[in-house]
Image: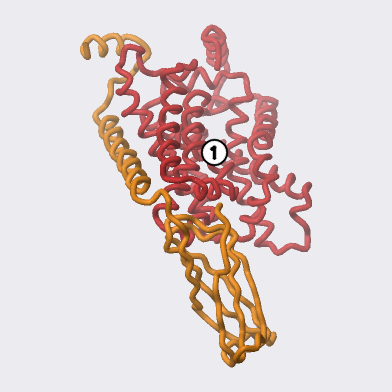
Chain colours: A orange, B red
Amino acid sequence: MPEATKDIASSRRVKRGAHWIEWMVGGLCTLLVAALILWIAYHAVINSDGVPELDVKVTHQQANAGGSYTVSILVSNKGTRTAAAVPVTGTLKAGDKVIETQEITFDYVPAQSTATGTLLFKADPATYQLNIQASGYVDP
Amino acid sequence: MQVDGTAAATSGDEATRSPDEPAPDTFLVGMGRGVAGALLFALPMQMTMEMWELGITMERWRLALLMVIAIPLLVGISHRIGFEDTFSWKDGARDAMIAYGIGILTSAVTLTLFKLLMTGMPAEEISGKIAIQAIPASIGALLGRSQLGSGKDDAEDDPQAGYGSELFMMAVGALFLNLNMAPTEEMILISYKMTPWHALATILLSITLMHAFVYAVSFKGGHELSSDTPWWHALIRFTLPGYAIALVISLYSLWSFERLDGVSFTPAITAMIVLAFPGAIGAAAARLIL
């Protein structure tokens, strides 16, 4: 059967037999696609019903020339689902009194990934208690 | 694309004309087709907000890399589908650069028309906005010059198509659709909405459609293999390498347009699978059309 196939093929439009390179490239690509399918299938089995787990950290603080203060933050999502429209609120407090509140929204914090942004305060965060948290998320 | 009889007739015609000296009006017609192709293929991108923003925000070295990669790509396309009887690499390179030029000029004109380029803007913004549009526009210009033409090119490219050339054309098709779609937010949004099961289904459907497009459905021009060859031969030698190419190009496009920054492995892989779906269709279609 393979013999017959080859004969007919070469007598028609095919100008070339299947070179070994074609089979090697084909084999490698088959392995690659198979690995991809297995990886995704593995994740499908272990965590198809995960939830986002958000955590906010301050990475950098500095005073700006204009008199404002920047607080750079890193939002990480350790969960297995992506969070969308994540509002991150930074509050400066002196005891129970709220001095200033600033909020930014991250469009997406993908699963097991991080996103960065910056809050701008008018008061110096170093002289107050700084509290930063993600206040919610939308399922994408 | 072309009926065999006509194709034979046109190639007979060509033999009588000296390939070194195309008539001046042939060149002008070619330029006109190039502009038409550039507009036809690149207007959707020129009217996409994300593409304007990327022109400003994209890291300059990623943009520069994309522009450099476009050169061998254009030369390769030009060599493969060659217009104006160009079959040497020198002519291919010349035509590629003409197409690149057409791409840059048409992008500059349309973006100016949409008031996206103004005199007060910093040079970096103007150059970035034009540069990012010039790549799809230049591919369009090359394709326009051959595909909107008489069709003689279609008849000529097939016989010399080797395995590497097949894979190359699939890469061009995948890249073309990916350039259209990778800049949009929807690509990552879809990947975030998907569960791994959806991603798995997308992979299988991409491969099935690709294979069906080229082999099972057997469009004209899409069939190098005899119908007696076992189906899995074509699957392993063409469809799966084609899909792997679509995956790699999709990953490159996403990375290039900064959709993967800060994103971990699995979400990046899912986004790659989403974008490889149109990429796979583009790759399969390129083998049929080009």
Q: Residue B253's x, y, as percent?
A: 50, 48
What crowding class fits label 1: few (fewer than 14 Cα within 10 Å), some (14-19), or many (20 or more)?
many
Q: In the orientation shown, which residue stands out farthest toward the top?
A: B5
**Foreground: B123 or A91?**
A91
Give the quarter of the figure containing the N terminus of chain B.
top right
Residue type beneath disc 1: Phe
User: In which quadrant of the rendered view does residue A40 lie?
Assistant: top left
Does dot 1 land on a helix, a strand or a loop? Answer: helix
**Foreground: B158 or A128?**
A128
Q: Residue B83's x, y, as percent?
A: 56, 27
From the viewer's perspective, tell me whether residue A78 is left or right of residue A26.
right
Please state the chain letter of the residue tagged with numbered disc 1 in the rendered image. B
User: In which quadrant of the rendered view does residue B105 lie?
Assistant: top right
From the viewer's perspective, is residue B231 above or below residue A98? above
**Foreground: B224 or B29?**
B224
**Residue that badge 1 annotates:** B176
Which residue is at a point 56% across and 57% down the rendered structure image?
A84
Which residue is at a point 55% across and 73% down the rendered structure image?
A133
From the viewer's perspective, tell me whether residue A25 is left or right of residue B239.
left
Q: Residue B165's x, y, as percent?
A: 41, 31
From the viewer's perspective, is residue B116 above or below residue B237? below
From the viewer's perspective, tell me whether residue B218 is left or right of residue A42.
right
From the viewer's perspective, is residue A59 above or below residue A5? below
Q: Residue B235's x, y, as percent?
A: 34, 26
From the viewer's perspective, is residue B201 above or below residue A104? above
**Foreground: B231 or B130?**
B231
